[in-house]
Image (cartoon, rainbow, N blue to C red):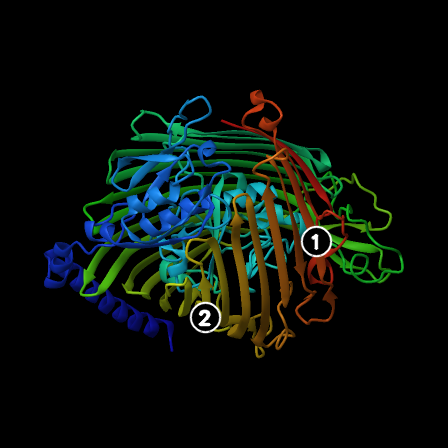
Amino acid sequence: METSERGRRGAALLRAMLLCSATIVVGAAAGDGALAASAKSGGQVAQANGQTSGAQMAGQRFDIAPQGLVTALNAFSAASGWEVGFPAEVARGVISPGVSGTMSADDALRRLLSGTGVSFRMTGPGRAVLTRPQTGGVVLDPVTVQGTRERATGPVVGYVARQSATATKTDTPILETPQSVAVVTRDQMDAQAAQNLADALNYTSGVTTGRNGESSSFGGDGISVRGFGGDGTTGVSFNEYLDGLRLKGSGYLTSGIDPYLFERVEVLKGPASVLFGQASPGGLVNMVTKQPSPDAKHEILLQTGSNGRKQAALDVGGDVTGDGRLSYRFAGVGLDTETQTDFTERRRLAAAPSVTWKPTDDTSLTLIGLYQRDNFDGSPLNFLPAQGTLLYNPNGKLPTSFFMGDPNFNEWDRKTMSIGYRFEHRFDEHWTVRQNARYLHNDLSYKGLYAAGLQADLRTMRRSAFSLTERADDLTIDNQIQATFDTGPLRHTVLAGVDHQRLKSDTVRGLATAPTLNIFNPVYGLSIADPPIYQSIATRITQTGVYAQDQIKWGGLVLLMGGRQDWAETRQRNRLNQGTSAQQSDAFTGRVGALYLFDNGLAPYASYSESFEPTAGSDFFGRPFEPTTGQQYEAGVKYQPPGSNSLLTVSAFHITQQNVTTADPQHTNFNVQTGELRSRGIEAEARISLAEGLNAVASYTWLDAEVTKSNDVNRGKRPVAVPTHSASAWGDYTVQDGPLAGLGGGIGVRYVGFTYGDPANSFKVPSHTLVDAALRYDLSHLHPQLQGMQAAVNASNLFDKEFVSACSRATNCYYGLRRTVIGSLKYSW
């Protein structure tokens, strides 16, 4: 079927969906019989603001087992919709007796606190703060510094997130989302001392990280999801989003944002084009930045460690006006470090200011800024040969510190700047509008040498000198309208939106032959001239999408369906020959899913989803390439025992991607779109807080990926750097009471199975198992004047294993990171 025909059919289907949704919504707004009856009877479910109807308050079921007070309150808030705030010292070491039965929310909270010495007072509908008398009758100030009602973009206590907006663009429980979603919380990132996005996702199922070893930190982080994304040569991936808006890249130009600026990192596995437009069929990674809050937040972090690491970070925020109407947040990072590779050094400065203004309880505007400057001495293309790293070389083995370039021609300077906002207004309990927008500027200057081929003596490496400057300006805006209403026994959350993305980029690249290098007796400090320009291109990309989605609840049954129509255009101008080209494409994508939530916390689900990605270029006859298309079938089960702070997910999936370019067998140096990829597998992931102070995460992935159609040597082969088996587990515990109170630590194990090192699968990269560990201590237990201070030591690859992380061909291999130790001193107030 031609793209235009698919587009017309898709547009017709989308119009029908929108018309249907509009009819229902208009009927709801007009107060049809079903809606009116529901409103009069007061049969509403708990709203996001924590308000509950009188009928529900009179008889709501609670089943919360005896446990630590923090986890008990999390379970209470999830069940009731209430928001409970408390200073951390109020709940420290307190065990709740639990609560079971049908009662009002305030009675349930009263029973939950019985015998603990903790009491509560109401501060508004569905909102309470806790207090507890200290010795001598002094009452702790009931300042709300920790809320238990989680929101999709807010902080999480522990490792188990309950809400996410990445899969639906609405604040939806993960347990009620019929697609696999994983959330890495700030607490987990802090415990593991994550230094880049790959570190944050090391313990997530379905995700392959660090494919490019130490070079992953330069951009893209070498991440793939379910076998897709993350270019095997440069590590650049285009499945990354920031606060729900796509981070577009151009060539080597990606943002590589420092993870200290994140509140959480979320992975939506499988196609997501129905809400986000062009996207990888494997899924996407959404980085949620730290947000302003009226609750005071102050932190200073100092770090030092391996390779002369020096880092300082600051995170402050709080209420400006005293009434919660204006709040701010500022997070910043400064870094200077060498690396395990010779002649490489990295410097970073990052800042993320944000302000939230709430003129009314129903209106909010958040301004979000970002600045990051990365100035590196070192190349992301430090390719190493398989012979000498992975395979036998009669001349010896290259050390993990080996540098393929030259310090005289060695620069990476990247600037990222953005300004954006999130606006939301709720008209009433049914209607909400949102607008999210961001302008992003990226600027990159790079030059370096890279390996071009090992000569017959297996010691002389041919090299090329490469330079580039890339600049990109990206404007993204997403307009949404959400309606929540009932039609008879069905509860609807309808979302409709229009988004638009516009990217302007300029790329100038140079290439020339460089002096060879004796890799076993290297001579550096050569005089290397800038290479001549071979490419100078101006690119303009626009994409507009219209989408609609309906989330339907009927008892324990949850249905999700949506559709989207996209129109994309790419225009390029070659400044070397003044040639121009234009390419237009359109695509319709859809998604449907079903889930049933049982009272015991089991939630089996099944879903079907689609994706598309525009493909640049044209075939021999000048016909522009159509977008690649992807389809996924997924089935699984989620489990969240009532009253527990845990989430377990097991899923099976089958993804197919069509229209992949492959060599034209009739015309040399041209491609045709007859290629196809298939990825199928099973994933299991558990995130658990077994008791207060104990957190754990474990995952396993079996992934069967194959190039099913191709005219190249990769037909029937496995894609490079994609393991069949991977598994990980991390446990973390902090002593709550006794002489060792405040002492904590964690230990983790990561296993990555073997991968193939080139498209022909002619050689393998062996599996590797790494151990990570952490140890920390709350210094306030030594002296009261050290209140808020914590010391920690983290080690990744604790036993200093030497390994090759991945290869994409015989001359493109990467050493994995050796043992890295980081010492931290944090002060919070």
Q: Nearer the viewer, residue 530 or 746?
A: 746
Distance of mark 1 from mark 2, alpha carbons? Answer: 30 Å
Q: Please, is residue 359 above or below residue 769 in the view?
A: above
Q: Label 2 belongs to which residue?
A: 634
Q: Residue 482: x, y in percent?
A: 25, 53
Q: Nearer the viewer, residue 660 or 208?
A: 208
Q: Label 1 belongs to which residue?
A: 770
Q: Nearer the viewer, residue 656 or 166?
A: 166
Please identify the quarter of the rendering in which residue 28 is found: bottom left
Q: Which mark is residue 538?
A: none
Q: Residue 530: x, y in percent?
A: 67, 43
Please identify the quarter of the rendering in which residue 584 is found: bottom left
Q: Please, is residue 15 above or below residue 340 in the view?
A: below
Q: Residue 323: x, y in percent?
A: 29, 27
Q: Is residue 734 left or right of residue 387?
A: left
Residue density around tag 2, few if under 14, some if 14–19, many if 20 or more, within 10 Å: many
Q: Please, is residue 433 above or below residue 762 in the view?
A: above
Q: Residue furthest front?
A: 115
Residue density around tag 1, few if under 14, some if 14–19, many if 20 or more, within 10 Å: many
Q: Nearer the viewer, residue 821 or 124?
A: 124
Q: Is residue 112 left or right of residue 798?
A: left
Quadrant where the N terminus lies? bottom left
Q: Label 1 sits on what residue type? A: Leu
Q: Report the number of discs.
A: 2
Question: Residue at the location (48% across, 50% down)?
Answer: 160
